[in-house]
Image (tube, rainbow, N blue to C red):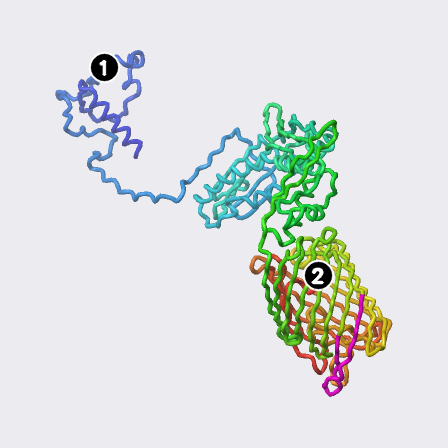
Amino acid sequence: MFVRTSTALAAALVLLANPLVQTVQAQEQRDTPRLEDLIPDSAVEDPEDWASQGVPVGDQADAQAQEPLDAAAPLAEMPMVTIPWPEEIELPQLAPLEQADEPIEFVQFDDEIPRVVTGSEERISDELVLVFPNERSLFPQREEFLERFSALSTIEQLEDDENIARLAAQAREDEALLQQLLDVYGYFDAQVIRTVGEIDPATNVDLDRPAVRFDIVPGERYTVGAIDLGNLRAAGDQYQALRRTYDIEVGDFISLDEIEAEQFDLDTALGESGFPFATIDAPSLLVDHAREEGDITMPVEPNGRYRHGTVISSDPEFLSSRHLSRIARWDEGDIYRRSDEMDLRRAMLATGLLGSVELTPVVVEEPSNGEPGVVDIKAELSKAPLRTIAGSVGFGTEEGIRLEGSWEHRNLFPPEGMLRVRGIAGTQEQLAGVTFRKNNFYGRDRILTVDAFASTIDYDAYDARTASLIGTYERVSTLLFQKAFSWSVGLELVATQESERAADGSELDRETYFIAALPLYAQLDSSDDLLDPTEGWRLSGRLSPEISDNEGVQSFYLRSQVDASYYQSVGEDTVLAGRVRVASIPGAPLEAIAPSRRLYAGGGGSVRGYGYREIGPLNNSGDPLGGRSLVEVSAEARIGTGYMDGAISIVPFVDAGSVGLDPTPDFDTVKFGAGVGVRYDTGFGPLRLDVAFPLNPGPNDSWVAVYVALGQAF
């Protein structure tokens, strides 16, 4: 119909445009005119002349005179045309189109663009499919590429709402991302063909939801052409070693990641080889598509090799240059290493005396005749607050309440001479003491401590009134510097009046003990964290030869203890941990050893579920006597939950322990405890809450025990 209407209107316009044309009232004929009658040969030979002659009157026309056309009148009825006059046509009104959130993209493919229609499909999600060549050697980085793209994909990051306009916009961003990632791996001629729709382009199957397909044609992987490392040869005899550190050679496949990583490695090697002033500009890559190669240019200036001098303090009265040089891990004359400088900065901040530290190498002697120069390290110090008032509150169902407070000045006796005054007020213990500590005393991480205190203790096993003077010289792990090997030696002088309990619970007469001891300690630590280990092991031992005078009777004995623990990760969120402790006191009978020096078990760091020091041989009233041998075993599983971004973990555990009267464990009475704990990762260390139950409690044991502390139980 539309074709016929257009033809009729065109014919009408032709007639109206020629004023010489007259309307001919044709007679009805039975035969249809032939084409030769309508278009004579003269019209074919000269169509313009024929058209200018108008319409001739045939023999078969009416005798009626022909009249000119009236422009205002409708055309006479024509045969074969049944269309109404345009003014009489009523067209339906069309509803306006609703504007989409995003313009709909119609994807057209050029037949000349290669497509991996028979490639290997990697479906990332319901909305996203990547197609790679079947031959994996054409793109061997597929797995790493997919993992990287999935983490950065805009389609994967935003919510799936089955909106094709939204998906089309995201697909354009992901196409650009794919091109960038292909460049990272050196595929500079790669093609990415994007398809957006509800039909799977590979199978022509209706997906009933919009989806995106990317066909990836990696092409040839470019290789490294020329390498220009600036003035690196000025490093002299260190050039070869430094060049080997920059592990990129001509002909290697190009990887932008590797180019960046090797810049870092070379910079580190320069800093560790005696070049404190070395500079490295950002590398550039010039890609030549004709050669399918890229030329690397990275300007390097070694700027001279140097040895370490000394450390110069900006405030020698506060922290002297001599003391800072003692903290440093290098000796004067050693080849400069940047890591030594960084380590010194961390150690200075770890003293707690400084708010900030700025270290600057200063040239003392320039390199000459192939020999390194000398640099001192200038230390600009900014003091931190030196005085601290601290307090803590603790509670255990068996230990009761414990309040502790302290005041300290961390540099009252420079350098690093601390004085602390502390006190404890608790249900079972009261204490007042003074502590002097000298950090980094005649060596890095070596600590001299002198502690004098007086205390009263009221346990179920005994009560004691004690005055002690303890001095130790040690090298132990700290929260900032965990050490593989720690040790401690000391001297301990104790005067104590102690009383055990009788069968009826009353206190027996107090006995006075004067004790001198030489405590020794050593530990091997291969664990990966001090407060929350997940891998490795620890092995430690304690020996303390002691002499005790009780009412003129002298006794010699040896207190010894061995601890071993092991940590093993299982899966991503679970750590299995186990601990064994064995202790013994040979050399003297139980009665000659002060109750406070005997062995006990029970409590949060021992056998959970029992009170502190309440496991062991009992007197007639059920109170522990202490012993001369001890064995403890603990096992627990630290299971991550994923709650609060993984900060919460659940820890089921089981403990067992035995205390004997003889130096050799007899296992006559083994106490078992079990329970479950919760750990909250504070970022500094886990906060521990354990709820434990005694599995074979005695008459004086509670049915449940609760422990709160910082750090794991072991």
In the image: residue 134, left or right of residue 698: left
Dot 2 or dot 1: first in sequence order is: 1
Q: Position of residue 488 (x, y in %)?
A: 77, 59
Using the image as rendered, state which of residue 23 and residue 445 is in the foreground: 445
Does the rendering let one see residue 267?
A: yes
Helix, strand or loop at mark 2: strand
Magenta stretch in the rendered image: 496-517
**What amino acid is at disc 1?**
Ser
Label placed on residue 658: none
Does the rendering let one see residue 143?
A: no
Magenta region includes residue 164: no
Report the residue marked by disc 2. 576
Q: Position of residue 404 (x, y in %)?
A: 62, 69
Query: Badge 2: how crowded within 10 Å, few (<14), some, or many (20+)?
Result: some
Q: Quadrant of residue 309?
A: top right
Q: Which quadrant is the C terminus positioned in?
A: bottom right
Residue that extends furthest to the front in the rendered view of this protein = 317
Using the image as rendered, state which of residue 321 and residue 206 is in the foreground: 321
- Residue at the image point whose x is 30% and y is 43% from the top: 96
Helix, strand or loop at mark 1: helix
In the image: residue 33, left or right of residue 21: right
Magenta region includes residue 501: yes
Q: Which quadrant is the N terminus positioned in?
A: top left
Label placed on residue 52: 1
Q: Position of residue 53 (x, y in %)?
A: 22, 14
Q: Quadrant of residue 590?
A: bottom right
Distance between mark 2 and mark 1 Cα atoms: 106 Å
- Residue at the image point whose x is 14% and y is 29% from the top: 73
Question: Which is more foreground, mark 2 or mark 1?
Answer: 2
In the image: residue 195, left or right of residue 15: right
**What amino acid is at disc 2?**
Leu
